[in-house]
Image: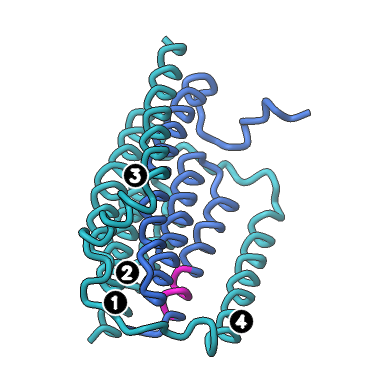
Chain colours: A blue, B cyan
Amino acid sequence: MLPTIFYIGLSVLLFVIGVCGVLLRRSTLMVFMSIELMLNSANLALVTFANQRQSIDAQIMVFFVITIAAAEVAVGLALLVMIFMRKKTTNIDTMTTLKG
Amino acid sequence: MELVIFVITAIVAIIGAVAMLVSRNAVHSALFLLLNFGAIAVLYLLLQAPFLFAVQLIVYAGAIIVLFLFVVMLLGAERDEEDANPIRWQAPVAITMAVLLVGEIIWVLVRQSQDSLARVGSSDSDFGSPAQIAQALFTTHLLPFEVASFVLLTALIGVVVLHQRQS
């Protein structure tokens, strides 16, 4: 197997690209996709450590993360559709209802 | 051989992620994200996780991306965006801090890689097989497994309730 650091480095790069997506894009859909990218890079790091330690527990944890991500996407997209129906835009700067 | 596959897959993954980030059209972004998920699935195979390879393809590529595409096309929000960010200093600051973050993590990793990132034990050819995953999932991790099913049910009911109130 290749050195662990290769995989972790790739995971870090993907995570930071996801962070940039959250910070730079103004569409809620794009922000959501970037969050999925970050979840995936964290999963990649977990699988790498599972292989490095030859321990199955991290792979089980990735399985649960994927489950929760699926639930989160379903609820999140439902919320997005509702917000779009009300505001007619997906621009994240228009969502200021909680602003004091 | 392993290195060649890793490098090609890593390049594909990074290209997918960056293209997702810069693409103006949300449908293109979702498809580039699919490319990225596929590349990560290949890396799972390299890392002795065939079960997660299948789960990644089925759940992420098969379900989540399709859901994204459905919503983007349903809303007609492909190009709904970018009339210049009202916070003008945000982009340069965000990019600077992202570069700093990468540098910092890589520095820590390189410093640590001698001891804590070394390989532990010998690799077992049976490691990560679906049988082994099932063994751990239905014995040690049975309670989280049941809780996960409950979370999925809650999400399902939540989505139905959200859309009922709307109509």
Disc 2 crowd rating (10 Å Cα; few below 14, some 14-19, many 20+) is some
Picture coordinates of residue B130 (x, y %)?
22, 59
Q: Are marks 1 and 2 in contact (CB under 8 Å)?
A: yes
Image side of residue B39 versus residue A40, left or right: left
Q: Main secondary structure of the magenta part?
A: helix
How far, Cα to Cα, is label 2 from label 4? 24 Å
Which chain does the residue under circle 4 lie in? B
Which chain does the residue under circle 2 lie in? B
**Hey, what amino acid is under mark 4?**
Trp
Q: Are marks 1 and 4 on the same chain?
A: yes
Image side of residue B151 versus residue B90, left or right: left
Which chain does the residue under circle 3 lie in? B
Q: Nearer the viewer, mark 3 or mark 4?
A: 4
Q: Nearer the viewer, mark 3 or mark 1?
A: 1
Ranked by sequence position, the earlier of labels 2 and 3 is 2
Q: Which residue is mark 4?
A: B107
Q: Which quarter of the rendered picture does the N terminus of chain A lie within? A: bottom left
Picture coordinates of residue A58 (x, y %)?
41, 62
Q: Which residue is mark 2?
A: B12
Q: Which residue is mark 1?
A: B8
Image side of residue B158 versus residue B88, left or right: left
Above or below residue A33? Residue B167 is above
* Residue occupying the point 56% across, 44% down: A26
Helix, strand or loop for disc 1: helix
How far, Cα to Cα, is label 3 from label 1? 25 Å
Disc 4 crowd rating (10 Å Cα; few below 14, some 14-19, many 20+) is few
**Hey, what amino acid is under mark 3?**
Val
How far, Cα to Cα, is label 3 from label 4? 36 Å
How far, Cα to Cα, is label 2 from label 3? 19 Å
Disc 3 crowd rating (10 Å Cα; few below 14, some 14-19, many 20+) is many
Q: Which quarter of the rendered picture does the C terminus of chain A lie within? A: top right
